[in-house]
Image (cartoon, rainbow, N blue to C red):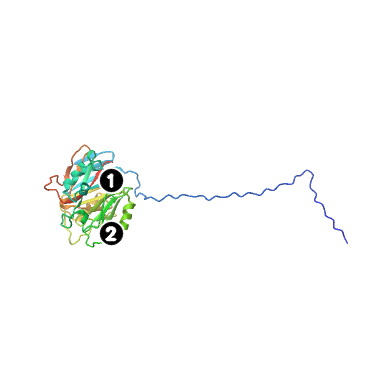
Amino acid sequence: NPTLTQTPTIRPTGTPIPTINPTLTPTIKPTITLIPTPTPTSVWDKETYDPIEGKNAKYKTITDSLKIWISKPTGYTLTRIWAKDPYKQFHTYNSDDYKKSSDIYINIFNHAISSNANGLKNKAAVAFNEMVSYKYSGRSSGFRKYSKIGLIIHEGKVLRNDPTSKKYIRSDICWIDKNSTLHNIDDIMYNSERTPARTETIVKSYNEATISGALTTVEGKKIVSNGKNIYKRRKSSYAAVIQGFCQINKNNFLYVTTNSGWWGEELANTLIKLGCKEAYHFDGGGSTNVFFKKPTDSKWTAVRGTKDPKYSRGPSWSISYWTEL
């Protein structure tokens, strides 16, 4: 039988046997990206817009944070306002702030100064009537018992939210959010959807937002949308002294107050010619008031309306106004 002989492995003398180290694959830790809570984005393409100066101003005041021009073109009073931070400069004041359920307008205007609301005593300001009390029309015994307005909001607080009544007059709620954007809710359209929870959500989403109360007049509502006249007459419509307002851009606002009876479509067309894309009209008639003061003034100047208590409209409830920061 053949003998099997093992052939030895021959290694060169002095040649070390190589050590094989395993390749270590590094542990890849996942990158954690923190996604911030989304915040409302501004619709404005500029941080601050230049003032749109009013021409031929009869009343004027210019400060670092508030600029007011009031002129009187044929047929109406035009108020132009430039506000540095509209969210912080637009306010409402009402008779309930001094423990009265209603009052005549001149008293509400004067109380706003005497109580130094938002520093009015030493600031420039322009003010407007805002909401007449429905006590005036014999519909209630005080603003907290309104039977005709379901949603009342004042300076970011819900004062009344009653979704049960079906007998609402037309009233709008307008407010400015923290991005200085004007918003609007049509109270009638909102009736079928309104619940206390939804209202609370809306108010919380614009926490501490400045909110003017119900804007009411002969069908007070939005009358310009996307630069087009959307006013529609009703059978109950009639020509009256009316007021309209709009936001031109982040910092510029304007108000039109008619000198005589206008139809809503006339007001809408005038607002469009002045540059309004979205516009609203609010309480007019005998309630129409436009008051103005410079920083050094201790009293209001009546641009439109009366300072005589004998003729001031009432019972009323609320005014709105712009002040310096």
Q: Which mark is residue 88?
A: none
Q: Position of residue 309 (x, y in %)?
A: 13, 46
From the viewer's perspective, is 227 left or right of 285? Answer: right
Is residue 143 among the parts visible in the rendering?
Answer: yes
Residue 203 point in image, percent of width and height: 31, 53
Secondary structure type for disc 2: helix
Q: Is residue 324 above or below residue 215?
A: above
Q: Nearer the viewer, residue 192 or 222?
A: 192
Quarter occupied by residue 297: top left
Which residue, as the protein is rendered here, is positioned at the far front? 99
What kind of element bears circle 1?
A: strand
Q: Residue furthest top?
A: 296
First in residue order: circle 2 vs circle 1: 2
> What numbered label is drawn on residue 252?
1
The residue sitting at 17% across, 46% down in the picture is 107
Q: Position of residue 115 (x, y in %)?
A: 21, 42
Tell me whether circle 2 and circle 1 mark residues in contact (CB < 8 Å).
no
Tell me: residue 175, above or below residue 163: above
Which quadrant does the N terminus fall into?
A: bottom right
Q: Amino acid at mark 1?
A: Asn
Q: Residues within 10 Å of mark 2 (few under 14, many from 20)?
A: some
Q: CA distance from mark 2 to mark 1?
A: 28 Å
Q: Quadrant of residue 198?
A: bottom left
Q: Disc 2 residue type?
A: Tyr
Q: Which residue is mark 2?
A: 190
Q: Position of residue 227 (x, y in %)?
A: 28, 54
